[in-house]
């Protein structure tokens, strides 16, 4: 299976953004629980604890906002997928904690925007 240079660039940019978001969250006092948590329903970029809340984080990385804000790419289908991922996580851990869903935007210049309770 071949990948275009653009596909490879997007993948590298996305992984870099996830690492920047992870470091940012740690500096904000969050504890990383899972990175790229895979389930039959999809993947959660990051799962962290923030105080007494379990946080499922979608990271959107863009070089700029010339095509709109990254958070705009988190559509209804993506939000529903994250809710199924959370239920799967709870089923595996045996408890349903106090949880929320956040989005972190990461830009090519290193700027980060954190949207708590995004959905």
Image (cartoon, helix red, strand yellow):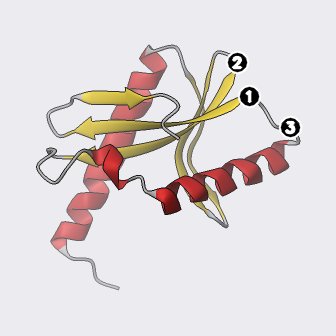
Q: Give the residue number, with chain letter if any, for mark 2.
A: 52
User: Quick one: label 2 or label 3, which is nearer the N terminus?
Assistant: 2
**Residue sitting farthest toward the left:** 66
Q: Residue at x 65, y 51 (%)?
A: 83
Q: Residue at x 53, y 41 (%)?
A: 119
Q: Nearer the viewer, residue 34 or 113?
A: 113
Residue 42 lies in what quarter of the image? bottom right
Q: How many marks?
A: 3
How would you rate the neighbour count of disc 2 (Cα within 10 Å): few for under 14, some for 14-19, many for 20 or more? few
Could you say which disc has been placed on residue 95 in the image? Answer: 3
- 1 vs 3, front mark: 1
The alpha-carbon separation of the residues under discs 1 and 3 comes to 10 Å
Rendering coords of residue 35 (x, y %): 54, 43
Classify residue 114 as left or right of residue 46. Answer: left
Q: Nearer the viewer, residue 75 or 15?
A: 75
Q: Residue at x 64, y 65 (%)?
A: 41
SS under mark 1 = loop
Quadrant of the frame with the N terminus: bottom left
Rendering coords of residue 77 (x, y %): 51, 63
- 2 vs 1, front mark: 1
Q: Give the residue number, with chain letter if any, for mark 1.
A: 98
The alpha-carbon separation of the residues under discs 2 and 1 comes to 7 Å
Query: Are circles 2 and 1 on residues that touch, CB within 8 Å?
Result: yes
Rendering coords of residue 51 (x, y %): 64, 15
């Amino acid at each position: 299976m071949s990948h275009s240079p653009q596909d490879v660039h997007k993948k590298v940019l996305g992984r870099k953004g996830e690492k920047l978001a992870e470091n940012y969250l740690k500096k904000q006092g969050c504890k990383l629980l899972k990175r790229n948590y895979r389930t039959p329903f999809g993947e959660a970029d990051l799962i962290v604890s923030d105080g007494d809340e379990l946080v499922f984080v979608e990271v959107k990385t863009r070089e700029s906002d010339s095509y709109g804000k990254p958070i705009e790419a988190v559509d209804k289908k993506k939000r529903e997928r994250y809710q199924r991922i959370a239920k799967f996580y709870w089923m595996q851990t045996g408890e349903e904690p106090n949880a929320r869903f956040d989005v972190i935007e990461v830009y090519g210049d290193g700027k980060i925007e954190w949207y708590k309770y995004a959905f």
